[in-house]
Image: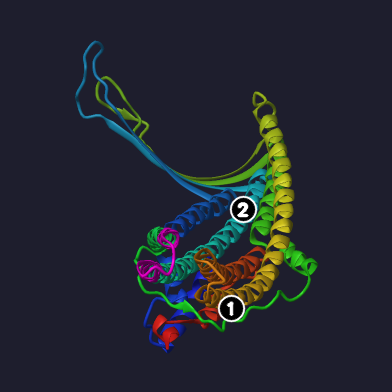
Amino acid sequence: MGRITQSLGLAICVSIGATPVMADDLVSILDLAMRNDPTLRQAEAQYESRHTLLDQGRAALLPTLALQGSTTRQTAGPAGEMSYKPGQNSHGYRLNLTQALFNLTAWYTYESAKLQDKAAEIGYAAQEQDLIIRVASSYFNVLRALDDLETRRQEEESSQRQFEQTQQREEVGLIAITEVYESQAAYDLSRNNTIIAEDTLATAYEALEAITGQPHPNIDVLREDFPVVSVDGTVESWTQQALNSNLALIAARYNLEAQQENLKARKADHLPTIAASAAFIHNVTAGSQSADGSVRGVGAIDGTSLSMSINIPLFAGGGTSARRRAAEYDLMAQQEAVSLTRRQTTQNVRNAFRRVNTDALVIAQRQQAITSARSALEAIEVGYEVGTRNIVDVLQARQQLFVALRNYSDARYNYVVDTLTLKQITGLLTPQDILELNEWLETESATAQ
């Protein structure tokens, strides 16, 4: 258990120790999340709880040692009288050692527990991978909201300047009052969008804080030269990799094997069991006390015993057969669970593969869209100055430019998260992916320079 967590912790220590951190980067935030995320801590506690089933199953195959003791006080007196005279004590103890010699039910139950423990370990590793995705998604949602707010503010400032210029031109009679109204409407809408973007950013910060337990008001941003490439290989090769390495599918297969062993255990409930026992016995007998107070038969005995017992189940009210039938249905259900997980894995990896490749193409097209929208705006503004374009054309062209900027930002963050998701589905996501991604982050001040 905890292999991913341990690897990540070591990598984080090396990374933080090597370079000073001016802002919260992805690695430091993920480190906090590994230690503070309630979902992961809950999964860890649940794994530890299930891990005890392995010890419980093993216990049925190991010897048991028990100590029994007893003491008895006897008093006697004349008939019809209650005697409180000093009486005699009989006491002793017995130390029993028992070992199962033939118990297939216990053996198959233990084998099932081992497989369930492996499934639980894989499930916990899957929770660690899920945390990586949740942290990355929340982190880049903050950056997405920051970019959105920045473009909204720029759009608001641009709309305000346009509104003021339109008012001045209308005052000197160069344009009609309708253009002022158009400019004011655009400015009011951009101001409203800015307010909404500020709330969206606050929500994104809260979502990140909910994972780590700490606020992160200053985080590193993604560099502009972050490489965007298509996925290597074919969708068939990635699908096969996912079918071999997807953690949810591996855990489902372990659970299937565990149910198979559980069915064997329920069938073995019909078989006899054999056990051997050894005991050491120490008894002190006080004897019997007569009416005149004399005691007869006092003595102490030490002894040992060896025995072998066989238990043949004949009838238990139908309960044994009912448990066997329940195990058969549980096995059928787990077989369907494996089939469902396999289909979902195939579907998810193919969709993720296409998304990453689509993201790469979209980013390139949206870069071109920004260039085209900027050129169109400049041309329309010139046309507006010479009277061949109206204010509506200018406002629409400016809006298209800011939409293109936001779309480009979204596409970049979608590409990052989708790439990590593809690796998660195929079972290839490791802390090294976060360390490599972290190299493409930098402080906002560095970006401004």
Asked if 234 appears above or below 283 in the picture, the reply is: below
Q: Which residue in the structure is indicated by mark 2?
A: 116
Q: Amino acid at mark 1?
A: Ser
Nearer to the camera, 425 or 355: 355
Secondary structure under badge 1? helix
Number of on-image labels: 2
Give yes or no for residue 166 being in the magenta stretch: yes
Task: Tell me the crowding category of disc 2: few under 14, some 14 to 19, or many 20 or more residues within 10 angstroms, Cα based.
Answer: many
Q: Is residue 422 left or right of residue 401?
A: right
| Quadrant for the C terminus in the image | bottom left
Q: Position of residue 446 (x, y in %)?
A: 42, 86
Of helix, strand and loop, which mostly describes the magenta segment? helix
Q: Which residues are magenta?
A: 163-185
Q: Residue at x 61, y 59 (%)?
A: 118
**Disc sitting over residue 307 in the figure:** none
Which one is earlier in the sequence, the residue at label 1 or at label 2? 2
Q: Which residue in the structure is indicated by mark 1?
A: 375
Q: Position of residue 424 (x, y in %)?
A: 62, 65
Asked if 364 appears above or below 98 in the picture, the reply is: below
Q: Is residue 133 left or right of residue 212?
A: right
Give yes or no for residue 12 being in the magenta stretch: no
User: Toward which corner of the image does residue 292 lie, by quadrant?
Assistant: top left
| Quadrant for the N terminus in the image | bottom right
Q: Residue at x 65, y 50 (%)?
A: 112
Mark 1 vs mark 2: give the one in front: 1
